[in-house]
Image (tube, rainbow, N blue to C red):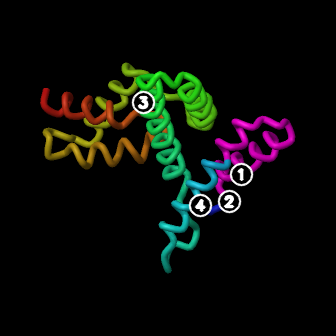
Amino acid sequence: MSSSSALRTLFSDALKDALKAREARKVSTLRLILAALKDRDIAARTESNREGVGDDDILALLQKMIKQRDEAIETYETAGRIDLAEQEREERAIISSYLPKQMNADEARSAISELISELGAKGLRDMGRTMNELKSRFAGKMDFGKASAMVKELLTA
């Protein structure tokens, strides 16, 4: 995927808009996203891949950043630092706004059931293949931690 993907353009444009609007939290959060993306690009560059990471990897990065914010919120609340927890919540909301709409549990279960049938997956030995296909089809739309438990449940049923 080209390093000038739609998501990259979206982040750059959003940063310019946030700078003009003087939205400090949004500016800092978008800079964090762009810095993490640049780090991933550098790590991913090889002789055969000069483009950097693609949109699926960017979505995975955003999901990882959200998970980090969730953990930080919990830590700060436990420590009584409500101000810092609120800052993390604001960052989480900004990052989440760039992800596609998440599937609810029923939609995810339905998609997983259909995929298992389509792949002809029969047991736990097909779990890796099923998860890889889920990740390629539903990047950014599904919590793969929860999806993994559903796949396991459906493959052993």
Bin the neighbour count of mark 2 within 10 Å (Cα to Cα): few under 14, some 14-19, many 20 and up: few
Residue that carries the numbered disc 2 in the rendered image? 4
- Determine whether the residue tagged by mark 2 lies in a helix, strand or loop: loop
**Image check: 41 left or right of 156?**
right
Start-end of magenta stretch = 4-30
Give whichever of discs 2 and 1 has the lower sequence position.
Answer: 2
The residue that disc 4 covers is 38
Q: Secondary structure at mark 3?
A: helix
Q: Is residue 95 above or below residue 56?
A: above
Q: Position of residue 106 (x, y in %)?
A: 37, 19
For the C terminus, which image quadrant?
top left
Q: Amino acid at mark 4?
A: Lys
Q: Give amino acid for label 3.
A: Thr
Seen in the picture, residue 43 relative to 151 is either above or below; the reply is below
Q: Are marks 2 and 1 in contact (CB under 8 Å)?
A: yes
Q: In the image, which disc is placed on residue 80?
A: none
Going by the numbered disc 2, the residue's amino acid type is Ser
